[in-house]
Amino acid sequence: MEKDLASKIEELGEYGFAFAPVHIIVTAIQLDLFHLLEEAKTSAELARIKGISYRGVTRLLEALVTLGVLSKRENRYLLEGPMSQLFLPSSPLCMGPYFLHLENLYRIWAHLPQVVTSGRQAERDRNPEFPVILARGLFPLHWFQALDLGEKLKTPDKGEVLDVAGGSGVWSAGILKHHPCLQGVLLDLPPVVENAAKPILNKIHLLNRYRFLPGDMFEISWGKGYKCIILGHICHALGEDDIKDLIEKSRQAIDPQGILIIIDFLPHPQNVFPAIFNLNMLLATKEGGVRSQEESIQWLRNGGFTIQQILSLRDKKGSKAFIATLR
Ligand SMILES: C[S@@+](CC[C@H](N)C(=O)[O-])C[C@H]1O[C@@H](n2cnc3c(N)ncnc32)[C@H](O)[C@@H]1O
């Protein structure tokens, strides 16, 4: 009994500073330290270059070493190896925007008691940069899953892939990398197209295989004849009527031999992430949430599609890809 209690206290106690790694990394990003650490420096050198406290920066650098983000040789700190790809802004896999997105979420999560009480999303200032940071932040998170999906996918050899609410274009890009005769079409809000999709697709050498549909997905025309349409991580932010609307628009825009792919998180009793994300959608959206596999299948069936395959993606958060064709 006592042993059980002690281990439960230890388990719950670990949540205590779960917030800290994000703040540590975000502080290094906001102080713009990472690019200076491409060449090894002591904390005294860094404090001098940036005009900041030696005492403060030393503790920050030590924490970054403990987190495995920086290396330390003698008394010099260095960003090297895979961490350079993950923290230098020039890299397409830079996770900086993802951490900045998490920092935005901390502000929203502070409203959880009111949101649970009212059942309605948090009142907050709309930061116009938010969708751009989110789209850029999701690229590294989804990239290896997208490559995996592209490798497994049997699509027609030629034609266009429409990436709806595509953000950086990550899902279609993963498919294009494995299918050299396909072309991409990315639909998202104009700032996201300009400041997330175009720069990232350029960095991964796919920009010349894309055309763009900047605008609101519910309002603009999607065009026709797509061999593949992707709704990647968008349904969780929407209510049922909007999801049905997107499936109907997909039905009208798809080639008779084309495939529709819906990618999203699914609830899982042993995985805490979908339950946390469900609260995140309560906080941040009007009607969004994590839906069951049965609900997604039903929406596709009612929308005129037949499910061909359900693929588990390479991620610990429990996403799946529903692959469907016209009935
Ligand atoms: C969670 S992100 C997913 C991005 C991308 N599909 C991915 O999985 O990385 C949702 C995307 O939907 C876009 N979006 C939201 N509402 C939209 C609308 N009404 N029209 C077009 N895009 C929209 C956002 O700008 C954002 O890029």
Image (cartoon, grey):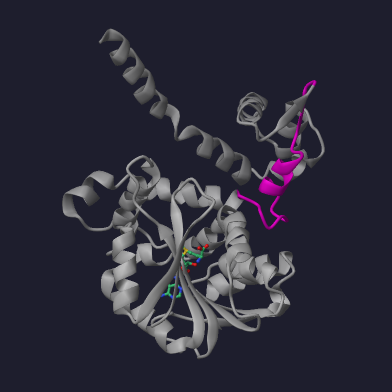
The answer to which of 157 and 15 lies nearer the viewer is 157
Q: Is 225 drawn above or below residue 162 in the view shown?
A: below
Q: Give the residues drawn in magenta, as a range.
A: 74-95
With 311 as the anchor, is 219 left or right in this view? left
Q: Quadrant of the N terminus?
A: top left
Q: How many marks?
A: 0
Lateral position of residue 47 relative to residue 172, left or right: right
Residue 326 appears in the rendering? yes
| Nearer to me, 84 or 61 | 84
Give residue 185's position: percent from left, percent from top.
Answer: 58, 80
Is 147 on the left or on the right of 255, as rendered? right
The x, y position of residue 271, in whole percent, is 38, 42
Look at 37% across and 60% down and name the residue there.
125
In the rendered image, residue 219 lying in the magenta stretch gets the answer no
Q: Residue at x 54, y 51 (%)?
A: 314
**Does 77 sit above or below residue 290?**
above
